[in-house]
Image (spheres, helix red, strand yellow):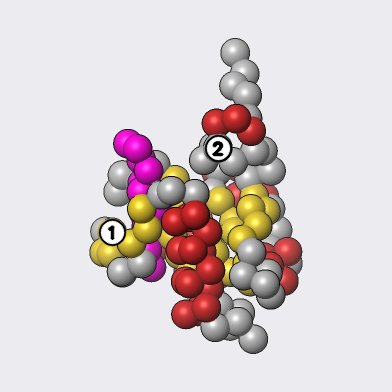
Amino acid sequence: MTNEKWLRWAVSRHFRREGLTVNMAAAKVGNAAIDGEVEGQGWKMALEIKSTHDDIVRGLGQLVEALAHGYASVALVTSLKNAKRIKPDIFDRLGLVLLGVDSKGIVHQLYPTYASPLNPETYTTHN
């Protein structure tokens, strides 16, 4: 069973190591609330943390609400085992990010399936 507090710690540590600003306080966005946000130069990404027994569909709704209220990107964070069971269709189609945290506290990006835009050296643009 994955503890939400542990997921928060692992994902905030991951993004802080990348040099980004992390705020894990709940924020109201429209009719929903997100669990945290990551801020880079000129962009913000909303984070929704879901433990093993939380409702993933509700989390997706909260992320879509965050997109509608100005966030450049959104990410669903759950355990790696739980993340691997989620079908990728919605993430690939809408460009949502799915992050899985393994038992060692390492964060893995499962979807979208292209390279992460957080590191410009790892992706190329198509003309």
**N-term mark: 1 or 2:** 1
Give the class, few, some or many, for how many residues have Cα within 10 Å of label 1's Cα (few <14, many ≥20).
some
Q: Is residue 3 magenta?
A: no
Give the residue drawn at x 64%, y 64%: 106
Give the residue drawn at x 64%, y 53%: 109
Mark number, residue 81: none
Secondary structure category for the residue under label 1: strand
Q: Vertical placement of 72 versus 90: above or below?
A: above
Which stretch appears magenta? 35-45
Give the class, few, some or many, for how many residues have Cα within 10 Å of label 2's Cα (few <14, many ≥20).
few
Give the residue drawn at x 61%, y 61%: 107
Give the residue drawn at x 72%, y 71%: 81
Secondary structure category for the residue under label 2: loop
Observer-nearest residue: 106 or 82?
A: 106
Q: Which residue is mark 1?
A: 29
x%, y% of residue 26?
31, 69
Q: Which residue in the rendered view is the most extreme toward the bottom?
A: 1
Observer-nearest residue: 113 or 20?
A: 20
In which quarter of the view is residue 124 placed?
Answer: top right
Q: In the image, what residue type sits under mark 1?
A: Val
Q: Which residue is mark 2?
A: 119
Observer-nearest residue: 1 or 23?
A: 23
Q: Vertical placement of 99 versus 124: above or below?
A: below
Q: Is residue 36 magenta?
A: yes
In which quarter of the view is residue 16 placed?
Answer: bottom left
Judge from the rendering whether residue 20 lies leftward or rightward of residue 102; answer left or right: left
For the residues marked 1 and 2, what is the alpha-carbon distance in whole angstroms? 27 Å
Q: In the image, what residue type sits under mark 2?
A: Asn
The kind of secondary structure the magenta stretch mainly shows is strand
x%, y% of residue 35?
38, 68
Q: Residue 63: in sight, yes or no?
A: no
Q: Vertical placement of 77 versus 117: above or below?
A: below
